[in-house]
Amino acid sequence: MTPTARMSIPGAPEVSAPRAFAPPEARDARGRLNLVGLSRAALAREMAAIGERPFRAKQIWHWIYHRGARDFATMTTLAKPLRARLAERYVIARPEVTRDLVSTDRSRKWLLRMGDGQEVECVHIPEEDRGALCISSQVGCTLTCRFCHTGTQGLMRNLGPAEIVGQVMVARDALGEWPSPRDGRMVSNIVLMGMGEPLYNYDNIAAAIRIVMDAEGIAISKRRITLSTAGVVPMIRRCGSEIGVNLAISLHAVTDELRGRIVPLNRKYGIEELLAACRDYAAGSNARRITFEYIMLRDVNDSPADARALVRLLAGIPAKVNLIPFNPWPGAPFDCSTPEAIARFAAIVNAAGYSAPVRTPRGRDILAACGQLKSESVRRRKSRRDPASQG
Ligand code: SAH
């Protein structure tokens, strides 16, 4: 049985993937531990283990996450012998950038290679005076949502904290945002909307988010971080009580029948149960609004009746709706709704008092838009077999 088959819905795990999907240990070929991705407490333990006092951990944290240091040699507040000692035991490693593509609309996609050769993509979406970074949580995905390109590749493995924080660090390297700028940042917001289901890799994404939020480092607050999930209900509760970031739900359909077909996870956690978890989440975070993502699929889920049913479902939830025109990919079994259908849908949701912006597709030309990400490694492998499958 392939790993993907083992993980397929509805046998998907409640909270985390089996050990086979765990990220590899964060050490380089010489056995040196990567300090990126360690919690503050773990970093302090490392320093204690080599006979250093706790404030060393604070200094090093500042160098790594505020200054963006990649090399102990640059840590001029540490004595030279200590720098050398650290370099014998530790590294400060990011994923390797193997491709860097810029769209005509200025969004930018990096293909990143991890230590074990696995690859993920991460996308920067700049606005006038800020920008969002869309990061991945897994190599591939188990969810097999019918409209999503990543869903066609299966799950390779989970990403570790270093690989998740590393995506933010790579973007900051490329955009020259070290030391952490006070304001005017182009990496001002983070969305966990790349490859993978973040709530199936909860421990690792939670560890990474804690590092990203740390005020003495990268310092991006939870109000500027949005986690998007297809609806892993038990983990939504934990996410609310433990990290409290903004929540986005990939709803996409208003009946269990249709949602079960296009988002197979719905067969495990149905719409009613999912919305109950959303109500609780909102109540526990001072009624911060929850974003409902709704992909516009022509003649599938885009009728006025669907829009009215959506409004009824959301009653009582502080919500906004993000309408996402379907982004095509080679061989996709759907078309994007017509602009008229999208406008009609948005008008109905708006009239009910919900903001319902239509997400402008960004980076379609470099296959960087929502649902178009897929490991380049997998695309390449496929295209060797079948050149026609290449986008
Ligand atoms: N697994 C998480 C996060 C990854 S998907 C989740 O399901 O939310 C990020 C968003 O892109 C989701 O709303 C997803 O449904 C949407 N998406 C996937 N494929 C898409 C496509 N082809 N066009 C537009 N949006 C898509």
Image (cartoon, rainbow, N blue to C red):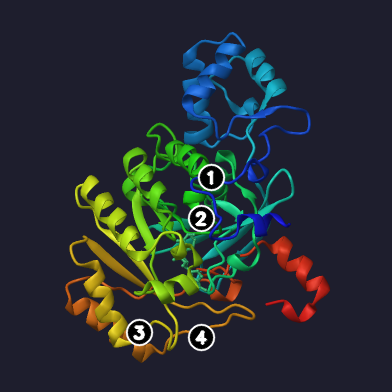
Task: Where is residue 216? Give x, y as percent.
Answer: 40, 31
Give me the C-alpha separation between circle 1 and circle 2: 10 Å
The label on residue 197 is 2
Tell whether circle 2 marks a residue whose Cβ is less than 8 angstroms from ligand 1. Answer: yes
In the picture of the structure, the residue carrying the numbered disc 3 is: 342
Specify the quadrant that holds the C terminus: bottom right
The residue where tag 4 is placed is 335
- Label 4 or label 3, whichever comes before in sequence order: 4
Q: Nearer the viewer, mark 4 or mark 1?
A: 1
Q: Which mark sits nearer the N-terminus, 4 or 2?
A: 2
Q: Earlier in the sequence, mark 2 or mark 3?
A: 2
275 or 58, which lies in front?
A: 275
State left or right for residue 71 relative to residue 180: right
The residue at which mark 1 appears reads as 16
Tag nearer the camera, 3 or 1: 1
Query: How many other residues sit within 10 Å of disc 4, few (<14), some (14-19) or many (≥20)?
Result: some
